Amino acid sequence: MGEERSPLRPGPDLAEEASWVDADPEMLELQADAGRKSEELHADAAAALEQKRQRRYLVRALLRSPTFMTGLIIVLFWVFMALFSTFITQSPTDVDAMASLQAPSAAHWFGTDDLGRDVLARTMAGARTVLVIAPLATMLALLWGGIIGLVSGFYRGLTDEIIMRLVDVLLALPIIITSILILSLLGKSVAIVIVVIGALFTPVVSRTIRSAVIGEREREYVMAARLRGERSAFVMAREILPNITQPIIVEGTIRLGYAVFTAATLSFLGFGLVPPSPDWGLTIATERIFLQIAPWTVLFPAAALASLVVGVNLITDGLSRVFSK
Amino acid sequence: MLRLIGRRLLLMVPTLILVSILIFALAEVLPGDVGRSILGPYATDQQVKILNKELGADRPLYERYASWAGGFVTGDWGDSLLLKVPVFPTVMKALGNSLVLAGFALLIIVPVSVLLGVYAGLRKDSFLDRGITISTLSMTVIPEFVSGVILLYIFAVWLKWLPVTAMPPEGAPFVDRFYYLILPAIPLMFLELGYIARMARVGTVQVLAMPYIRTAVLKGLPRRRVIFGHVLRNAMVPTVTVIGSQVGWLIGGLVVIETLFVYPGIGKLMVDAAQTHDVVMLEASVLMVAVIYMVSNLLADIVVALLNPRIRMGG
Amino acid sequence: MSAMEQPASSPDAAPAALDVRDLEVTFHRRGRDLPVLKGVTLRLERGEAYGLVGESGCGKTTLAMAALRYLAANGTVDAGKVLVDGQDVSTLSEAAVRRWRGKQIAMVYQDPATALSPAMRIGDQVAEVFRYHEGLDKKEALERARESLRRVALPDPDATLRRYPFELSGGQQQRVVIAMALAVNPSLLVLDEPTTGLDATVEAEILDLIEELRGRINASILLITHNLGLVRRLCERVGVLYAGRLVEEGPARDIFTDPRHPYTMGLMRCVPRFGMNKTDAALQTIPGTLPALGEPLEGCVYSARCPMAKPVCTRREPDLYAWPGDAGAQGAAQAESMPPDPAAYSPHHANPVGEAARHARCYFSAAVSTMPATTPVLATSLEERGGAEGAVLEIGAVSRSFKDGRRRLTAVHDLSLSLKRGETFGLVGESGSGKSTLAKCVTGLIAADSGSVTFEGKLLRPTAGRRSQDALRAIQMVFQNPDSTLNPAWSTRAILTRSVRKLAGTREGSVRAKVDKLSADVRVEPRFLLQRPGDLSGGQKQRIAIARAFAGDPTLVVCDEPASALDVSVQASILNLLVELQTKEQVSYVFISHDLAVVRYISDRIGVMYLAELIEVGSAEQVFNPPHHPYTEALLSSIPKLDFDSEQQRIALRGMMPSLSEPPSGCRFHTRCHRILGEICETQEPPAQVAADGHTYNCHIPPDELLALQTGEEPVAPIAE
């Protein structure tokens, strides 16, 4: 036992040590006590670990989900391109009249459009507007829809009746049509598009959150809070809200997908952005007359847009699968 | 049952009134000066004033709403500001065209997607289930103009199997229409495929977990009897509800597809009216769309009631 | 084990109805293997009724599902086999399994409401069995279905054939399920908690039916339940399952009168015997909690909770030894010093399975009968608890109704009662009688439509939101469902801290101390305070919920079925805790339960509710003994009791519980009453009869006449149809 103990190596355990200490009864009892204590500590640590394990389980399950990871990589790719493509590719707006509608080549991997702009550069930069509009619109919708859903689900009764009747009314009009109506009157700007999409998604979000709230509000812990004299705002924000985060997250990613969809569609219909923005929807709308002679001008942005929405959708699918387990 | 339908019809009235107010507000109140918004910033004040008088826009709001709504109910929808033609027949004709296109798409897609969804649900978490779920959902979330141009390129430009346009030339037999409609209908089908399939899958999965399915299996019934006798009927309830509420989404798709394929339907009519500030045409067509949406929801509710004896008998 | 391995088709012995041999089943969840059944062996002779008893997670339903070859997708049979009628279940082809299910083996389920296909007519569902097993055409099959329904004594089988499940009552639904199971005369009938969730009187009806059918069918019965009383009534033999192990097996009478495994003994002691009260005796509890599914257990599976456990019990797992035999005595002697030599005992399999065969998986079976009682009597008499001080709570003519579509359901009708300080008022009644609504009117979760709730002489506002913080503090509630009673997003400490802050108004510094005291009072170890409810067991959650109710030193706590959702071994400790807190804190309880024995045990006074009205009030003693209301009488007669000495006379109630929207005229009970007098019951509301001091009931029959009727001095009047 002359060996010096390294601080990194665990020492011999109590029982082993006891074998060379004279075994007097009091000592043994003390040791047993220590053993009981350490057992308790052990259980404590185990409990804490189990809790961490539970929470980490979700993250690990997500990381292991191929759909979620594929979606995440696709979306991150477009986020990266939206931020940094200008440093990598040619300018998306530089016009070269001499090089109009050239097929893909070494100089222009994706070819050029009618104004001689590099399609690769425009495709890579095309994510920008959509990636600004869609997340912001989604957040607005979650905020408004969350508040409306919480309030109408929590109070029920007349408040609920009125709000849901209004939601029905808004839902009776296709979102694309209502946004066209509003945008054709209000004018076209990124900010307006964000607010309009956010507002039009609000009813759907509020409906989802309302039903989640209704599921929770009859639970006994909510009654216990009422018997404690909590204000309604406290019950909604602190008691109910933390228990409906999963449906909110899933709803958020679903809406994000539709926000991309809707923003792109509005651009395509001419109610979103104006040229020379490299926005995909807008590009497809303006270049589609060249589909027969220069399909690359349309097909590349189309494929890019498709990959982004599919990416968001894969994230949604991965999330909801992991949550539902 | 009749009482149920009656009550639902009655409930539609206030919703419809609110919708019409909303449309009216959006189209006439929001832009402030109607005449100005139509004629643009370069028209003289005099011209704007004359137009406003012509439109009746100088009258008080409630009066304008009442005469508009009253006109809509009696079928007097006024004349288009731009095309100078009566709105009613124009909207109806466009609506007819759209119904042909959408009906064609739905007729094919409802059985296909229900089949796929139920199949995926029965084999929950299998490789096939994942494949069906992800591919159908992906098709659904890709905007229809994207799938539209890609399909247009493949089948019309590259392979040349299908025509580029959506309407046959004048005088062609009626059946030809469907040949021309194939290409525009596919993106519409994609649009619905994922939803309906997903709901059918979820419905199937939920029903399969119910104790009464265990009862049916442990009764010793053959698998197909369990599926067709016990699973499907109950699994269809959420699916039918979704098909009803999807009509709104389908109309949104029509707007895009009709624009892409230059098809004279109600969607194209609305986009054109919005772009040219043809307020009268716009209001009428949007309100018509809302009516269609509510009627299809009602139909879905009726089918759900037929599937569920509890609702059917409870009234 | 080789002794058992006879060929299934041995000519000299008829094959057993069910023969389970060393069955091991494992579930796979989140990458972990959870063993659920660990080498279970049991045998059901033809025509025998066998009760498999156990609490949640012990694997009893898994055993049934393995017998039906219907394990969940993540469950696998790792070893052993199941033979039904001599046929090895695992060797059947898919098609053969289908033909075999329903025809040879059939099942009755826990919740009849969900066991029937909601969108299919009853007739079609029953007829299906005949169509697929006997190849009958639609018309013939329906004809046979009608016969089947008649066999289970469903009124008006023709009308029932055309009904949908939702149009039937719970009892009728269960009759249909039974009719379906027995349709083609299976040789084995599995009953999985067939009456759990049904009301007491309906349960009694179903039990009567099963008993009666047993005489006419030749099916063996495997009854799976947590309810010992049920087994006692229906079964000849019993197996007790704990953590996937069969711990005791033998004839029902022997097991219930003389258990030889500490777990069986514990189970018998922790349910209140009929007529037992908290001031007479305390419920014995089983320490600890049920092991989680697949939890690794060293030595004897029960050693962690066993009051008799010796070191050897944790070292080496005992076999299933025969009793009486050398196992008990010798084992006890030997095991004291060293692990027993298995060869010294006669293991289970060497014993012929016969009438008298008893087995227990314990080294110390002989000592079980003298197993020490652990809990002292906790309750003091009502007077000592301050019961003389007068009314704390007075409910005056409270009514409350709900809208259900176009109908109005009156859940509480013109109800009055009062409650003394330190008193426990037990409220009994079947589902829909209005107990919970009344409780919520008291706490203010629901506002009464009319009437008054007076607390300590002050009129309370109808809803909690309008009551003063002090009134809220004084009246708290413990809810039924441990899984939703605590906010899953909060830590337990946060839950208690918030309650202490809001209710006790304690200053910052002492909040922590108060929370620690509360958790110590309800015996929750401090380490659990760091956890969220999801990581606690049902019993722990309910303890935290009780601590929360006591945060502000309440005067009155309304307990709405506080232990009903818990396993029986946990239930006892929760009831004891409530009794103990009451003695310490002088709190009053309104205690709601459908379990009459529990109410009798814990209550000082009892009120019986029927169809929104309080039909009888009195001391626990008075209400449970004649003369009492005919409904109370019927209710009491319907509970399956554990004792073998008293053969009980069951009173079957006629018809269904009437709707709350159209309560019967006159006496509300007259449509089902077995002591109906005649027209007077149908037309006139019964007067309140005073049977004794503080004991009243609403009936037209005066106390002395009723007493004569109920003590059997006069024959029970024939039921007028």
Image: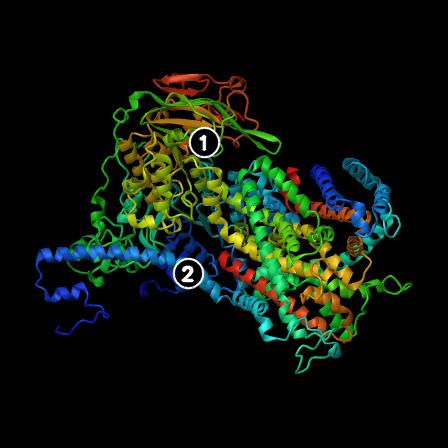
- The chain to which mark 1 is attached is C
Q: Are the two marked residues, 1 and 2, in contact with CB atoms closer than 8 angstroms?
A: no
| Relative height, residue B285 to residue C315 (above, below) | above
Q: Which mark is residue C464?
A: 1
Q: Quadrant of the N terminus of chain C?
A: bottom left
Q: In the figure, residue A84 lies in which quadrant?
A: bottom right
Q: Which mark is residue C721?
A: none
Tell me how the rendering is colored: rainbow
Q: Which mark is residue A56?
A: 2
Residue C711: horizontal and vertical position, in percent?
A: 36, 23
Q: Are marks 1 and 2 on the same chain?
A: no
Q: Amino acid at mark 2?
A: Arg
Q: Around disc 1, counting alpha carbons within 10 Å, would you say few (fewer than 14), some (14 to 19), or many (20 or more)?
A: many
Residue most extreme to the bottom: A106
Please state which of residues C335 and A234 is positioned toward the viewer in this rendering. Answer: A234
Residue C243: horizontal and vertical position, in percent?
A: 34, 54
Residue most extreme to the right: B171
Q: In the figure, residue B50 lies in which quadrant?
A: top right
| Relative height, residue C563 to residue A186 (above, below) | above
Residue at image position (69%, 64%) is A281
Residue A267: horizontal and vertical position, in percent?
A: 70, 61
Please state which of residues C591 and C325 is positioned toward the viewer in this rendering. Answer: C591
Residue at image position (28%, 24%) is C386
